[in-house]
């Protein structure tokens, strides 16, 4: 909303300032009304072209108050510097024979005011859309951002291809902004263009999931052109996590280990899925379809809906049937949770 007001005010001010400086010039030099309209129209056209160009630049966010303040100062400083160029132009280039020196100086003043409007507008707009990438840098010192509230989450390529992030995000469990760096999108594009059929399929699936995430109004996902140190995507993700003090969501076990060593918080979706699997207590009854024989004598093997393996004593005789079983014990393995049960007599 602030940007729309800023853009409208910029166009109106540009037209007003142009008219303010052209009207005295018309009275002194008897400029035709059509030329006055043309000059004002040209100023409006230039301002609208600047606004349109600004709209097509990828938008980012920053707190409005600090953005306006910082952008205004930067714009005024730039306008002050450029005013010397305009003054130098006025000294080097004499006024035309049909224009008086006073009118010529008035026009140059108008040009300086217009330059000031343009630089202030661009400065404010740039800072408002730059968000947390805007940094104050003192030689050899970089002031780190203070993160208040929820921290952003950087999404890895493996998470997008996995696809479960779409369902998780729609539950609103994840708080804060989810960021997809541009280099992650580029990696998906490379996979989608790969001559290898499997990689190509994974890349296209990832791009489809990403499009759904970005288009979903209930999910806060942005694609940002963020630069980070590192030669690989994994190295850039860890560096970016340190730089933004953000969490990195990934299914890559090795990436998680490296990130942990560098004090970057990791969300592993596989670990999350394991944690959310239902707990089976000894004596609990459940229905399982026995699909194959187990390794032990008389054992049958079935699976719950979440993929948990259930080893059923005496289940070999009822392979292919959905039978009530009683849980005897559970163990946690590197592959996940395993449940041991026996055929229920009831």
Image (cartoon, rainbow, N blue to C red):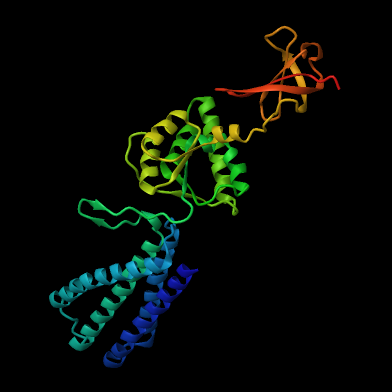
Please give the name of the residue rendered at 31% of the width and 88% of the height, measured from the top-left corner. 31
Furthest residue in direction left, as rendered: 92
What's the residue at 39%, 79% (across, down)?
Answer: 13
**Residue 36, image x and y in percent?**
36, 84
**Image position of 69 with respect to 232: above or below:** below
Residue at x 79%, y 15% (from the top left corner): 319
Judging depth in this view, the residue of 38 and 227 nearest the camera is 227
Residue 304's place in the image compared with 292, above or below, is below
In which quadrant of the rendered view does residue 234 lie? top left
Using the rendered image of the protein, determine whether residue 95 is visible from the camera's viewpoint.
yes
Total labels drawn: 0
- Tell me: residue 339, above or below residue 113: above
Q: Is residue 73 left or right of residue 89?
A: right
Q: Which of 278/176 is in front?
A: 278
Q: Looking at the image, which residue sits at the far top?
A: 297
**For this view, does 234 lie left or right of residue 303?**
left
Image coords of residue 104 (percent x, y)? 22, 83
Residue 79 horizontal/vertical position (percent): 26, 72
Residue farthest toward the front in the current orientation of the protein: 283
In the picture as drawn, the residue positioned furthest to the bottom comes out as 27
| Nearer to the camera, 71 or 252 | 252
Q: Is residue 214 above or below residue 341?
A: below
- Answer whether residue 35 is visible to the viewer in this image: no
* Nearer-the-camera pick, 331 or 144: 331
Instruction: Classify the position of the C terminus by image quarter.
Output: top right
Is 93 placed left or right of 207 in the picture? left
Identity of the residue drawn at 57% across and 41% down:
165
């Amino acid at each position: 909303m602030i940007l729309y007001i800023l853009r409208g005010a910029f166009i109106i001010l540009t037209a007003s300032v142009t008219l303010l400086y052209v009207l005295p010039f018309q009275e002194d030099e008897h400029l035709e009304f059509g030329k006055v309209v043309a000059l004002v129209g040209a100023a409006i056209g230039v301002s609208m072209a600047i606004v349109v160009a600004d709209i097509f630049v990828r938008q980012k966010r920053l707190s409005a108050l600090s953005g306006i303040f910082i952008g205004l100062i930067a714009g005024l400083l730039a306008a002050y510097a450029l005013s010397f160029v305009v003054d130098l132009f006025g000294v080097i280039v004499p006024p035309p024979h049909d224009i008086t020196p006073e009118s010529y100086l008035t026009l140059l003043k108008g040009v300086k005011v217009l330059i000031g409007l343009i630089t202030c507008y661009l400065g404010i707009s740039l800072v408002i859309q730059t968000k947390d990438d805007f940094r104050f840098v003192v030689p050899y010192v970089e002031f780190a951002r203070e993160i208040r509230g929820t921290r952003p989450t950087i999404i890895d390529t493996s998470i997008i291809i996995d696809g479960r992030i779409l369902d998780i995000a729609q539950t609103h469990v994840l708080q804060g902004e989810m960021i997809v760096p541009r280099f992650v999108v580029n990696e998906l594009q490379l996979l989608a263009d790969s001559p290898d059929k499997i990689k190509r399929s994974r890349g296209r699936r990832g791009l489809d999931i990403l499009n759904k995430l970005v288009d979903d109004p209930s999910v806060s996902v942005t694609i940002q052109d963020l630069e980070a140190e590192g030669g690989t995507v994994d190295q850039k993700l860890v560096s970016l996590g340190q730089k933004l003090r953000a969490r990195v969501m990934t299914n890559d076990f090795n990436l998680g280990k490296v990130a942990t060593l560098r004090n970057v918080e990791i969300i592993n979706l596989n670990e999350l899925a394991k944690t959310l699997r239902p707990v089976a207590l000894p004596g609990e009854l459940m229905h399982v379809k026995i699909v194959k024989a187990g390794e032990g004598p008389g054992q049958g093997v079935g699976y719950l809906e979440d993929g948990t393996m259930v080893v059923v004593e005496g289940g070999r005789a009822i392979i292919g049937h959905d039978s009530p079983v009683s849980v005897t014990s559970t163990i946690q393995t590197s592959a996940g949770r395993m449940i041991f049960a026996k055929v229920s007599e009831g």
